[in-house]
Image: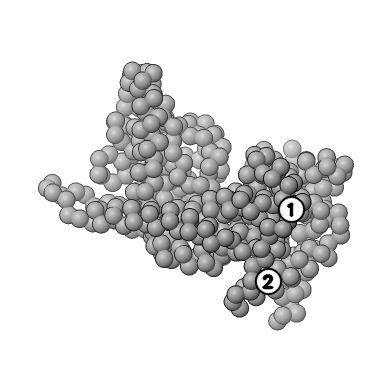
Amino acid sequence: MQLVAGGDARAFEVVYERHSTAVFSLAYRICGHRAAAEEVAQDAFLAVWRSGARYDRTRGSVRTWLLGVVHNRAIDALRRDVLHERRRVASEQAADRVEAPERTEAEAARREEARSVQALIGQLPDDQRRVVELAYFGGFTHEQIAQMLDAPLGTVKGRMRLALEQMRASMDTMEEVAL
Amino acid sequence: MSAELEHRECADSLGAYLLGALPEAERARVQRHLAGCRECRAELDWLRPAVDALPASAAQVEPPPELKARVMEVVEREAELLGAAGESADRPAPPPPPRRSRWPLTLAPRSALALAAACVVVVAVFAALLATLGGSATRTLRAHITNPALSRVQASLRVRGSHAELQVTGLPAPASNHVEELWVMRGGGPPSPAGTFVLGSGSVRVARPVHRGDLVLVTVEPGRGSTAPTTQPIMTVRI
C-alpha cells in the first residue's frame, strides 16, 4: 500500500487483482444489480487509489479497509434510493450472475472462508440473522428494521448484538479447533 | 443522562453501531462515549471481526473485465500526471532558490493531484462569485473535500480582506490525541500552520492573513498540531 500511496499504478493493479472479486461480490450483494455494483466498485477502487496514504495497517488488513469503503459506498447508494428499484428487478432476474471460477488457491481459500462465514450466519436464529442482513446488506437503520418487523427498537438492537456475540464466539471456537 | 445509563445504552447499541444501523445523531453519541470508555472499546474490538467477516458470506461473483479496464485507465492517467508533477518538483528552479518543500515524500505527488482537482472546482466557484459580488465584500468559497471518506462533510471558507474563517458541518472527530490543523500555502512556498481545531460543526478562524491565490488546507495532525503537515489534506480551498 505504500507504493500505491506513492502513486504506483502497477502496485495498485496488484491490489485490484487480489481483491476485485471480493469487492465486486460485496457491491453486488448489496446493490443487487451488476451495473450498480460496477459503479460502486469502480468508485471504491478509485477512492482507495486516491487516498492510499490514509490506510493504517494497525487498524486491519487492506482487504478489510477496502471492503469497508465498498460497504459504505454501496449503502450510501442504497440510501439514496437510486438502487432500490433496480434491486427488486434484479432479485427476480438473477440469471446475469456469473459465479467466479476458482482460479487460484487463494480464490479457493476465499470460497472456503465464505462457506465458513455462511455457516456462522446460518447457525444464528432466524430473527437474529434477519436483522444482521437487513442492517449490513440492506442498509436499513435499526428504526426502519423495527418498523419492518413490527418489533420494539430495543429488541432489534438486542438481536443485532446477540448475533454478533454468537458469531464472534463461534469464530473463537473455530480458531481454537484450528490450533 | 447519568454516566451509568449512558454506558448501558452504548453497550446495547454496539451491535447496531458496528452494523452501520444507527442514525447519525445516535452514532455520534456512541462515538463520544467510546472515546472515554475503555470497556466499551474493548467490547467493540472483540465484536468487530464478526462484522468484518460478513462480506465473505456474499456469493463470489466475478467482476467484468471492462471494470478493470475502466479503473486502470483512470489510475494510469493519474499516475502519469503524478509522475510529471514529481519530476517538475525535483527540478532545480531559477534563482532565488526555492525553499524545499516540507511535504512528506509520499504526500507531494498526491497533493499535486488533489490541488489540481481543487483548482478546477474553486476556479468555477470563484468565477461565479466574482460575477455576483463584483469581487468585493465577503466571499464564500466552497472547500474541496479531498478525502472520499469525508464526502458528506460540508465546508466553505468565508474570506473578507485578508481574514478568513473556515465553516464546517458534519466533520467527524479526529482519532484520540489528534487535531485538525489549518495551513496556508502561498506561491511555491511550504504550508504555514494557521491554527488547530477539533470541531464537528461550526467555524474557526484561519490564524494567518490570506491573499488571493493562497491555498488553505486542512490536515489531521497528532498531539496539539505539527509544524509541517504529516498527513494528506482532507480539504483544500484556493482563494
Q: Tell me which residue sits at (40%, 36%) in the image.
A: B121
Q: Which callout, 2 or 1, points to the residue nearer the camera?
A: 1
- Is tag 2's residue or tag 1's residue first in the polypeptide sequence? 1
Percent across and percent down for residue A40 are: 58, 51
Q: Amino acid at mark 2?
A: Arg
Quarter holding the N terminus of chain B is: top right
Q: Is residue B7 visible?
A: no
- Give the quadrant of residue B159: top left
Count numbered badges in the picture. Answer: 2
The image's colour scheme reads one colour
Q: Residues within 10 Å of mark 2 (few under 14, many from 20)?
A: many
- Give the quadrant of residue B186: top left
Residue that numbered label 2 is attached to: A111
Return the residue nearer the eye: B218 or A64: A64
Q: Tell me which residue sits at (32%, 21%) in the image.
A: B135
Q: Tell me which residue sits at (71%, 42%) in the image.
A: A85
Q: Tell me which residue sits at (78%, 63%) in the image.
A: A121
Label 2: which secondary element:
helix
Check contact, mark 2 vs mark 1: CB within 8 A.
no
Residue that numbered label 1 is attached to: A93
Q: Amino acid at mark 1?
A: Gln
Residue furthest to the bottom:
A179
Return the residue nearer the eye: B169 or B10: B169
> Viewed as shown, does residue A41 lie left or right of B230?
right
> Viewed as shown, does residue A58 lie left or right of B28?
left
